[in-house]
Image (cartoon, coloured by chain):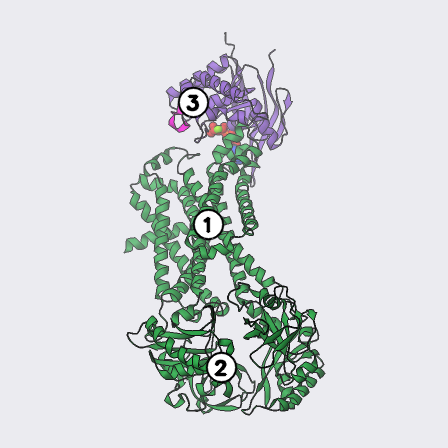
Chain colours: A green, B purple
Amino acid sequence: MSKFVRQHKQAWASLKKKPGFILTVLMTMGITLGALLCAVTLNYLLLVEPLPYPEQDRLFVAEHKLIGPEKETKAVAYTYPGLVHLYKSKQAFEQAAMMIYGQDVIISHSNQPLVNTTYVTPEFHQIIASPMAVGRMFEASEAIDTNNPVTMLSYNTWQQEYNGSADILDEKINLSGISYRVIGVLSEDFIEPELNGIGQETQVWLPWDYNQTGEGGRESFGNISNSLKFVGQLNKGVSQSQAQQLLTPLVSDRWQEGVVEIDFFNGWSVSMIVRPVKDVILGDSESIAVMLLAGVVGLVLIACANISNLFMSRTAEKQRQMAIQAALGATKKHLFKTMFAETTILMFMSIILALVISKVGFYIMQQYLGAVLPRVSELSLNPITFGCAVLVAITFALFFAKLSTRMINYRALNTTLQSSGKGSGLQVSKKTRQVLIASQVALATVLVFANFSLLKDAVKTINAPIGFETENISTLILNFSSTNFPTREEGIPIMAEIMEKLEALPQVESISQSRSPLDGFGVRALTSVADNKNYTPYFNNVSHTYFDMIEQPLVQGDNFTLVDRKDGTDVMIVNQAFAKQLKADGDVIGMQISTGRPDPFKIIGIVRDIAIPGDAATDHNSEALGSGVPRAYVPNGLNNQSFMIKVKPGQLVSREQLGKLLGDVDSRYAVFSFDAASDILTQRLFAEITTAVTTAILASLVFLLAGIGLYGILSYGTQLRRFELGARMAIGATRKHLVSLIIGDNTKAILVGFIGSIALFALAYIGMSEYIQPLLTWQVIPMLLVTLVLIVLVTLFACYWPLRQYINKPAIFTLRGSD
Amino acid sequence: MTEIKIEMKNIGKVFETDDIETHALKDVNIVIRAGEYVSISGPSGCGKSTLLSLLGLLDESTSGSYVIEGKDVSHLSLDEAAGIRNEKIGFVFQSFNLIDELSVFDNVALPLQYKKEIPTDEFIKERVEACLKMVEMSHRAEHKPNQLSGGQQQRIAIARALVADPAILLVDEPTGNLDSQSGDTVMAVLAELNKKGTTICMVTHDARYADMAKIQLKLLDGQIVKEERLKVAV
Ligand SMILES: Nc1ncnc2c1ncn2[C@@H]1O[C@H](COP(=O)(O)OP(=O)(O)OP(=O)(O)O)[C@@H](O)[C@H]1O
Ligand SMILES: [Mg+2]
């Protein structure tokens, strides 16, 4: 033990003299291993770690798939009565819950905050055994059809909106005119299954009965919604496919009965998909996690090559000291132990730094990637991370020690002492150096290129023109806080008064009584009357000032008028993409389009396409993204409860101000949401922005590390050739001769590196062609060229810079070996 | 009067390190004529190596003038100095300074590669073989330097110094790293070369070898204290 301690003390004493060396190793390994620990923990969490719920492998989501006449999937979404039928039949699942995700305003709260609400049946929290901070969870008393107005709050809502009040259970909260008694608060440790998309966080839980589906909707098989969900614990011994086979006829029979009178669904069918909750939560994020891991492993390899260089130079430097030790009787094993003591100290210091960095990394991921990757809230330093850290530290310590001692030609150590040391003795063989340069170049090329490609795609999406104005425009959506909705006729004058008051605000430039395109479109089943073909374009009800406000140009025909809205005229405006779908030449003015009601709509105008990031084509046969998406618009009613507000440049309107304005007109109205269009756009682009930032950081890190590494190995190589360079200078080599000599000698290694990178690409292509195939367009050629030029520039710099200290002085300095 | 190969006038060299000024050479005057064999000797630290590096344009003097074959080389840029070294000077070092990665042939051919106009391959081959023959190393042309003995390596170094047909051969302690037998062989090679007309300037500690030169310069504290010109009958 004392020997062990002494050895490490000695090693530390010897290291301490080289603070630059320690710092370089620590920073390089600390940062890259920190990133590695982050990526490994994330991958473990997503790929291996079970969900934090009891019997999680029996938790399944049942989904309702609508299949069109050509057997193509039309949508994965429930009808309300279909879901209730499934729930009440109690087949295949031991316990199951229904839920609807929504949003609402707590109007009883002084700030009137907009919150995420989820309407659930009590089984939901029972199945996942949600831990409670206060009170109880929903029970039989909140089961379907009990109409018991109670609520559970999330821990954050309790803390943030109610200051963690101890009397929270005495509190009543009002949403949409219904007063709910708080019966419990979920624990801080509660992890909500992200069934409604990554980053889903319910703030207020409400009983199923109070969901906001209207009377008609509860009976209608014509409406589908993808915020309706079904989750449960499968019966023991029932497999996923058995459950599917059991549920499909059950659901299908009821659905066919329900749609028998709706022509649109002729030839359609439904089938049930039963999927593990884990798959639903993870989606395709596994591939993101694996790609991230691959990128980080590349970084670690580059860092590892760099540090190998450093250790080899250090061994070369220490050769005299080791020769003396050998002369005094140290065996090869002794020398290894000395080296191992040093590498152990360095690697454990690095890994401690790496753990700190990964902790910071988890925090950053939770802050910024919560909307991109699932389960990030569960990220923490766990035994797996620690185990991985220790393993990595020991492996690298062994590797570096082994590498360093392998260079030592033990038998030649004695001659080191005898010779003057000029130019002789320990050197990294030319071959080793060449291999290091080549691998460095290969890795850097692959990683920089891969990052560039991702970055380019992300930047392209971010910068893509959306085709409409968002500047200074915000959408105000009203909340109605009473259970008896006003009729259309009652609503119209109220909305008119609100419009008038809004327009009178000094900051306001103009008002349009509709939502911004970024607030979402619906999807509507439409039939062309002439040929009876079915279409499912994005659909929106808009005001006659909508297109002007967002500056979306009309390319043909007429705009809606106020009269169209007042009288509910059956007119429609379509975008160019939909016009093309309807008729090859796009000349659709005057065409009749049916929504299933007796009177069809007549197309009166065509507007230019817009591209909303994240909107995919709804027609599954076309691959068009963003811009090619078909859209149809019809006039909305004068009682519409949402407004686009365009403020004058530099002016602001606050939520509070609007709340007060609404209250003055009619106390039943409050602000549901008031969001700037540009903010929504940024949110929609969040994944791309995150990708851009991440890849930009990774690319610069890779570039930096590769640059440092190439510089290290090339400058070490040049240093070793000092006496050779001196001899050449004595013979009459000019500076040009020497620069081209060094570049020429390294060119082979660099070329081998480039060829290696192509081989790596080929391997990657064979391994994961589905990811790489879409990247292979002619556009990769300029990217590849840019990468090559960058790497070549770095290499040239790394060739010249270490050389300049020798060739810009009289030859005697180089020849003598003293500076 | 034979042609003057080298003429140094009032050469001085001062090393400045931190606060200390070392006057390594003071007011040195040297004239070397074609075909002469000059030795420079003196105690350690007297300035022998410094003088040789000035003669070989490896370093610049602090004062004085230096002319090689009628060309003033006192003030040259680094690349000009490299050009003159290549054209007019052949070096032989104590530690050989051969390049391990190159074969003996390529080592010898190296100075020709640095000429302003690179000669033809046939010329190089002829010239290198002739030089290797002069040092009696023709049979080792394809070896690598580290496969040879010290004496053999030094003879290769001499062949390399000769290959570009320099005005003068500068030799620094050629036997310093050799045993006495190999040392004698190397000295015999130099003597033979001089006999055939090569001008040589050699630094040596060894009085025995210094005596082989016709002109013997003695240095003390950076100054030439004694110049002996032996009249040797040919
Ligand atoms: N780069 C330098 N910086 C400072 N002083 C130097 C430098 N090179 C040589 N000197 C000094 O110049 C003087 C002459 O050195 P030089 O190497 O020419 O001696 P030498 O005669 O070759 O000695 P030796 O026989 O030991 O090789 C010495 O006093 C030495 O300390
Ligand atoms: Mg000397």
Q: Is residue A222 left or right of residue A13?
A: right
* Residue B224 screen position, x and y as percent: 55, 23
Residue position marked by numbered label 3 in the rendering: B141
Above or below A257: residue B50:
above
Q: CA distance from mark 3 to mark 1?
A: 45 Å
Q: CA distance from mark 2 to mark 3?
A: 101 Å
State if disc 3 and disc 2 touch (CB < 8 Å). Answer: no
* Disc with the residue nearer the chain's start (1 vs 2): 2
Where residue A646 sits, quadrant-wise, is bottom right
Distance CA(mark 1)–CA(mark 2): 56 Å
Q: Residues within 10 Å of mark 3 (few under 14, many from 20)?
A: some
Q: Point out residue B125 in the picture as x, y percentages from the top left corner.
A: 49, 20
Tell me the amino acid under the disc marked 3. Ala
Q: Quick one: SS at disc 2? A: loop
Q: Which residue is mark 1?
A: A761
Q: x, y percentage for residue B11?
A: 60, 26
Range of residues picked out in magenta:
B143-151
- The residue identified by callout 2 is A261
Q: Is residue A342 above or below residue A87?
A: above
Q: Nearer the viewer, mark 3 or mark 1?
A: 1
Q: Nearer the viewer, residue A334 or A608?
A: A608
Q: What amino acid type should be assigned to the residue bearing mark 2?
A: Glu
Q: Is residue B150 magenta?
A: yes
